[in-house]
Amino acid sequence: MNTRYKSIFFDLDDTLWDTNHNNRECLEEIFADYAFDRHYDSFETFYRFYMPHNMKLWGKYRNHEIDRQTLILERFLYVLRPMGIEDNVFVLRLNHDFLQRTATKTKLIPGAIELLEYLYPFYRLFILSNGFREIQALKLQNSNLACYFEKVILSEDANIQKPHKEIFDFALTNTNSRRNESLMIGDCLEADIEGAYHAKIDQLWYNPDNHFCKRIVPTFQVRTLGEIGEIL
């Protein structure tokens, strides 16, 4: 146990819940069920078209360049326009279907449950996420993660997204946590790690692909969740 920390804030997507695998599975189901193969020669082609644009939109959402509704509409309109579809009502229905499917997926990052079982007796654990309210609670519940967390802090509650300092300040205030006794654990360098760094909160970067960080030196860095037990 690392006595320096009392509160640990976890990102959810791709830190504990395997977003890449689960969302890909949902998109593959949608590709088949909506017969998108009438335009795209394979799911792989569809996915390569969708994913970079989706990631770009999430980056814009974090930086307040677009709002939630624009993100929801544009991520699917981008792949539907080449099919001659530009119907917002259809897109919203498709997005709802996609979100409902994601809530049923339960694949976790390897070692997630084991890590939480280890940390739970010694630390106050919280989720700090930019994800949408209606889906994050279901992900946590269905994946058997909810029981480990004292509170879930969402960007929609704070009206600002990670990496902005204000959401970290909001999280500290709303969990009665001290800045110098808190640690942020996440996979996204910009949102989780640089965000916490500029909020003067220690960071633990879950970095499975061993990316290089030029702008800051994270407090800790691991390639597997299992390594966190050696730090905490």
Image (cartoon, rainbow, N blue to C red):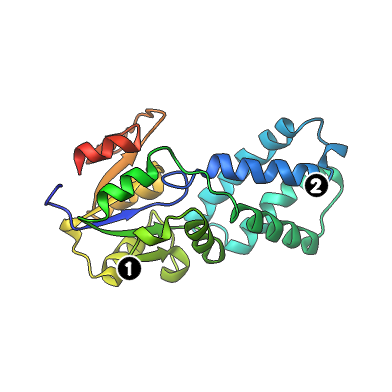
Identify the disc placed on residue 33. Answer: 2
Question: Callout 1: few (<14), some (14-19), or many (20+) C-alpha neighbours within 10 Å?
Answer: some
Residue at 41 percent of width and 69 percent of height = 158
Q: Position of residue 124 (x, y in %)?
A: 25, 60
Q: Position of residue 205 (x, y in %)?
A: 32, 40
Q: Is residue 63 visible?
A: no
- Which residue is identified by label 1? 170
Give the secondary structure at mark 1.
Answer: helix
Q: Position of residue 39 (x, y in %)?
A: 85, 37
* Marks 1, 2: nearer the viewer: 2
Is residue 172 left or right of 154 when viewed as pictured? left
Identified by mark 1, the residue type is Phe
Q: Nearer the viewer, residue 54 or 35?
A: 35
Residue at 79 percent of width and 42 percent of height = 32
Q: Nearer the viewer, residue 31 or 142?
A: 142
State how many labels appear.
2
Residue at 37 percent of width and 34 percent of height = 207
Q: Nearer the viewer, residue 156 or 100?
A: 100
Is residue 226 left or right of 73 when viewed as pictured? left
162 shown above or below 188? below
Identified by mark 2, the residue type is Asp
